[in-house]
Image (tube, rainbow, N blue to C red):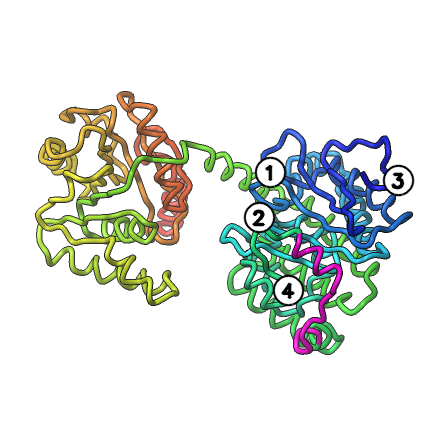
């Protein structure tokens, strides 16, 4: 127990003083599988930091005891509640204050990062003097707040440009993309990369020895935040953002650029104040409220199904644009895939498109042959017998589909699933002649398959719940959001689209 902490017990933080005089603060948020920066967690950290300031240790290591990662970000449910109460300003001011007190401790501090380190977690790491990250593949560091209609508000936007230079910092914040440990080190966000087993030891060693960042990193950080640089770079950044998002629809990136342009060279407190005012204004916008709602909806979709679909081999019948691209994406995502059609001349273009996808998505050229080998042309349809999932993607003709099912089902394994990529035909019209209707479902992708994130799982009244669970798990393995929908005409997405199409047709007819 640290001195000054006698008799104190925290719900979320564990405090330890090592023999070498280094204090270790371990976050283990109570009753939660992951660490999120709730106000309770934040207030406890504030109490700890205040006591550390009175009697400073030799150094401070901030770490997580959760296997999943460091900190996943702020508690968004709390954030929604603050928005309803009109207290977002207080919540942001509190977070900034605690992190600034951490930054002002008279002893060196280091964040020991593993797994996910996002949003408020990355901002906490930025408030430390140093950062060490584990070198395992699960480590991802980022500031994704613009995807929620706001931007980093606990000091992230005030500190990151000063640390890594404005171009790298703004690229991270404007896109919301996450970095691996090695990529974070390359831009100066992380000072050291270590194996997970020695992460805390590496953090303590860094506290004791310190680190001098390369001159190029320091020079870039200074030069790109000067008044002249901000005036030159800000319009260029806004122009790049405008190619993807309109200001009236997505104001957060523009507000971030504007705030940095005006105050990027100011003292830290002025930068924090400007950050807070801008984020508070964004938080009450319809864009932020809707994007946060979408975040919770997508999280709910991710929770559907189990982790294992039991699907290893996928057989696709129909090598047109949809069928061929479905097959290619499944192969890219690690499944063994066979692709069947009536003639080889229909399969060949699909295989060519698949290779183009692999060339684009698989950056390591040495791994492309391995990925390509997972997709095999299968004119005879021999892959049906080995498939765990069969996807039919032929023409929108109920009779043709039913005839195909009668040839496929006798060859399929007993536990294999049969699905159709129909975009409109109710499944009750297709299931009548199927031997195992409980294992039959719709699996409706959208074009282009590589870009569209949703896959509709179409129900019918004879479908087994286990079929939906397996298909949902399969969709998640593809990196897609599974959307269970009723088997009504148009399903969900096309039902939503039809009023727009009708209105467009009406407007055209009216001139």
Q: Which residue is mark 2?
A: 116
Rendered residue at 80%/50% (across/down): 21
Residue drawn 70% across the image and 42% down it: 26
Q: Earlier in the sequence, mark 1 or mark 3?
A: 3
Which residue range is magenta in the image?
A: 201-218
Q: Residues at badges 2 and 1 in contact (C-beta under 8 Å)?
A: yes
Vertical order, 222 against 73 (above or below): below
**Residue hosting label 4:** 169
Would residue 134 be found to the left or right of residue 441 on screen? right
The local secondary structure at tag 4 comes to helix
Asked whether residue 210 is drawn in magenta, I would say yes
**Nearest-to-viewer mark from 1 and 3:** 3
Q: Position of residue 460 (x, y in %)?
A: 29, 25
Mark 1 to mark 4 CA distance (whole Å)? 26 Å
**In this picture, is 75 found above or below 153?**
above
Q: Earlier in the sequence, mark 1 or mark 4?
A: 1
| Residue 192 figure quarter | bottom right
**Spatial separation of the CA atoms under disc 1 and disc 3:** 28 Å
Q: Quadrant of residue 36?
A: top right
Q: Residue 488: horizontal and vertical position, in percent? A: 32, 29
Q: How far separated are the C-alphas under marks 4 and 3?
A: 38 Å
Kindly identify which numbered label has been placed on residue 34.
1
Nearer-N-terminus badge (2/3) = 3
Residue tagged by mark 3?
4
Mark found first going from the N terminus, 2 or 4? 2
Among the two numbered marks 2 and 1 on one chain, the one whose residue lies closer to the N terminus: 1
Give me the C-alpha separation between circle 2 and circle 1: 10 Å
Overall secondary structure of the magenta section? helix
């Amino acid at each position: 127990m640290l001195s000054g902490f006698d008799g104190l017990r925290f719900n979320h933080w564990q405090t330890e003083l090592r023999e070498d005089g280094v204090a270790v603060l371990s976050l283990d948020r109570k009753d939660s599988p992951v660490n999120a920066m709730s106000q309770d967690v934040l207030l406890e950290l504030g109490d700890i930091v205040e006591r550390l300031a009175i009697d400073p240790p030799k150094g401070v290591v901030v770490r997580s005891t959760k296997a999943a990662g460091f900190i996943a970000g702020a508690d968004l449910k709390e954030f929604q509640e603050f928005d309803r109460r009109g207290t977002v300003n207080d919540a942001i001011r509190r977070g900034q204050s605690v992190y600034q007190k951490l930054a002002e401790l008279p002893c060196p501090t280091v964040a020991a990062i593993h797994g996910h380190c996002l949003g408020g977690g990355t901002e906490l790491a930025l408030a430390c003097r140093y950062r060490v990250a584990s070198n395992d593949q699960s480590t991802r560091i980022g500031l994704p707040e613009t995807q929620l209609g706001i931007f980093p508000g606990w000091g992230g936007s005030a500190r990151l440009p000063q640390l890594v230079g404005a171009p790298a910092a703004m690229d991270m914040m404007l896109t919301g993309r996450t970095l691996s440990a090695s990529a974070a080190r390359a831009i100066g966000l992380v000072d050291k990369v270590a194996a997970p087993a020695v992460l805390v030891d590496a953090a303590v060693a860094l506290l004791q020895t310190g680190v001098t960042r390369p001159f190029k990193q320091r020079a870039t950080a200074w030069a790109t935040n000067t008044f002249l640089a901000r005036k030159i770079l800000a319009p260029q950044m806004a122009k790049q953002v405008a190619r993807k998002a309109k200001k009236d629809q997505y104001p957060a990136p523009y507000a971030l650029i504007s705030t940095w342009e005006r105050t990027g060279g100011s003292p830290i407190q002025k930068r924090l104040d400007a950050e807070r005012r801008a984020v508070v204004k964004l938080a009450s916008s319809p864009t932020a409220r809707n994007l946060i709602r979408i975040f919770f909806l997508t999280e709910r979709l991710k929770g559907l199904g189990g982790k294992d679909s039991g699907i290893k081999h996928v057989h696709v019948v129909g090598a047109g644009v949809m069928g061929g691209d479905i097959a290619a994406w499944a192969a890219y995502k690690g499944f063994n895939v066979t692709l069947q059609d009536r003639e080889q001349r229909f399969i060949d273009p699909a295989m060519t498109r698949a290779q183009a996808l692999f060339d684009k998505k698989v950056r390591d050229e040495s791994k492309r042959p391995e990925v390509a080998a997972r997709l095999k042309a299968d004119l005879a349809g021999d892959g049906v017998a080995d498939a765990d999932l069969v996807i039919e993607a032929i023409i929108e003709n109920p009779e043709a589909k039913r005839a195909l099912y009668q040839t496929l089902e006798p060859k399929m394994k007993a536990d294999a699933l049969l699905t159709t990529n129909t975009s409109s035909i109710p499944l009750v019209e297709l299931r009548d002649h199927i031997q195992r209707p409980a294992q039959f479902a719709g699996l409706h992708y959208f074009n282009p398959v590589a870009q569209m994130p949703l896959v509709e799982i179409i129900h019918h009244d004879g479908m087994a719940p286990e079929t939906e669970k397996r298909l949902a798990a399969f969709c998640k393995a593809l990196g897609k959001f599974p959307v269970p929908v009723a088997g009504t005409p148009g399903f969900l997405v096309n039902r939503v689209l039809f009023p727009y199409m009708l209105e467009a047709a009406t407007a055209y007819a009216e001139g």
